[in-house]
Amino acid sequence: MFLRLKRISSLALLMVFILILLSANYHCALAQEKDGKTAPKTEKSIMPLVTFVEIGSVNCIPCRAMQPIMKEVEEEYKGQVKIVFHDVWTPKGKMDAAKYNIRVIPTQVFLDKNGKEYFRHEGYFPKEGVVQVIKMQGVK
């Protein structure tokens, strides 16, 4: 009888532990959705035709001049162009600068839909030039 009670207690304790874990996972996922950190669930993911990677710094004057251009391109070509900014003065940004073999900032790296680099520019890049480059990949 004592062994049976001990076994039932152990199983009950195990079930309570599992329920706590499941509950914590559910609440964590719910919090991420509220924060907007998870992608909205859609039936079909939209892959951008171009990823525009800007490697620069928030303290660099030509880099700061690129910020409004990146915002305009992101708004005008939403869903077709993904904008990514890496600040070289952060630890992650330094790694990204090394990954892309950056010599000067700002540098713009354009990747096709497969993630392969198809164009690179060093220095300030006017919007007209950016638009011309993204249209090379069929952006309309």
Image (tube, helix red, strand yellow):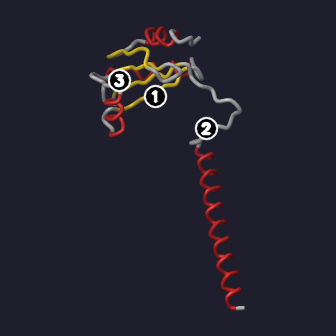
The residue to which callout 1 is attached is 84
Mark 3 or mark 1, whichever is nearer to me: 1
Q: Is residue 7 left or right of residue 71?
A: right
Tell me the crowding category of disc 3: few under 14, some 14 to 19, or many 20 or more residues within 10 angstroms, Cα based.
many
Q: Is residue 20 above or below residue 136?
A: below
For the point 40% across and 24% down, the residue is 54
Residue closest to the eye, 42 or 76:
42
For the point 67% across and 82% down, the residue is 7
Disc 3 marks which amino acid?
Answer: Cys
Residue 92 lies in quadrant: top left
For the point 36% across and 26% down, the residue is 55
- In x, y percent, where is residue 61? 31, 23
Residue closest to the eye, 125 or 93:
93
For the point 59% across and 54% down, the residue is 28
Disc 2 marks which amino acid?
Answer: Ala
Structural distance between the alpha carbons of marks 3 and 2: 28 Å
